[in-house]
Amino acid sequence: MKISYVIPCYRSEHTLEKVVEEINSVMAGMPEHTWEIVLVNDCSPDNTMEVIQRLCEKYPFIRGIDFSRNFGQHAALMAGLRHSQGDVVVCLDDDGQTPANEAGKLIEKIEEGYDAVYAEYEHKMHSAFRNLGSRANELMLRALLGKPKELYISSYFAVRRFVVEDMIRYENSYPYVIGLVLRATGKIANVKVNHREREVGSSGYTFKKLLALWINGFTAFSVMPLRIATCIGAGCAGIGFIYGIYTIIKRIVLPDIPAGYSALMSAIVFFGGMVMVLLGILGEYIGRVYISLNSAPQYVIRDRINLKTEQNNSSGETAHTGYRQTEKEQAQRKETGKE
């Protein structure tokens, strides 16, 4: 069986080589499997791409992908999945916090018959802010995407090839990998692994990026926010109607009481704010539809290393769906046509 490792890379010039060597060491102890590693540089501002080039030159089974700009972790995962060829695909981080030497646990669980396996950490070594973000993401997944309560979701996971094939069919501009896995199968398990402390640098997830991830998660695969908005709108309308009746009765019973300016302004501010929030949710959906209709790509690839054009198209992706071809690839296609 062939195992593919997909690693999104951002600011990992000091950690990536160690992660790759750890994977090689693990797989050397599993002679029944072959493996490949797909490294996706998400337009990292440091020397990460130079490290990827060096690794690709050293190991022919390592593939390199270079984005033209920063598209985010989930877009990088989608690019890696499209260029992977393994029967099982393992996705992990580039910072060494997800222990590559425990990948065998995920693979063994897959071999037991599960379609997807997520690593579960007993003690997470993230910052308090990152843990808070993970907790909020957990609640969002349970409420909007139907994630089972007992299932732990992390960035370290393994999936079967048929799950990958279903995931890469998603061609819209805002991929959300967790939602794609939950959409493809319900046969998902957890395995416990250690979570390491970060050796170099800090997490690339700022509050802005985490907020964008949450919004992407609940608008990409669920209309629940629109239903919640409908319920809130109906509730506010009901409150307003009841308050109107109360005001009329109060005016009839107690005609000498002056009209309440403060109460009126509070009601206007409250209902006006609710209307703006609900319009914002609706606008978010409409904006995403508009961007998707304009064929905005999930990512744009500047260059590939150790990947042939035939391999790139093995999953059926085309220039207008998952990515846009580079000028180098277009020239190669023209030359192939002439021959």
Image: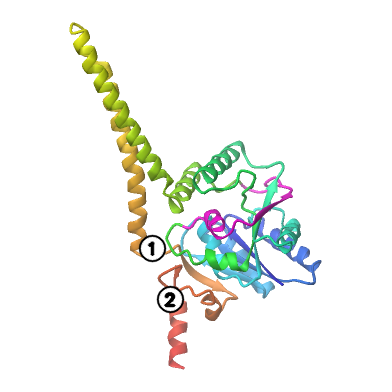
Q: Nearer the viewer, residue 201 or 269?
A: 269
Between label 2 and label 1, give the one nearer the viewer: 1
**Number of other residues with Cα within 10 Å of mark 2, as a class: few under 14, some 14 to 19, many 20 or more:** few
Please state which amino acid type lies under the numbered disc 1: Ala
* 339 lies above or below 134: below
Marking on residue 36: none
The mark that comes first in sequence, 2 or 1, is 1
Please state which amino acid type lies under the numbered disc 2: Glu
**Number of other residues with Cα within 10 Å of mark 1, as a class: few under 14, some 14 to 19, many 20 or more:** some
| Residue carrying label 1 | 296
Left or right, 42 with reference to 321: right
The residue that appears at 42% across and 64% down in the rendered structure is 297
* Span highlighted in magenta in the image: 175-201
Horizontal and vertical percent for residue 105?
Answer: 75, 57
Horizontal and vertical percent for residue 165?
Answer: 55, 68
| Residue carrying label 2 | 327
Asked which secondary structure carries label 1, the reply is loop
Q: Tell me which colouring the rendered structure shows.
A: rainbow
* 313 lies above or below 148: below
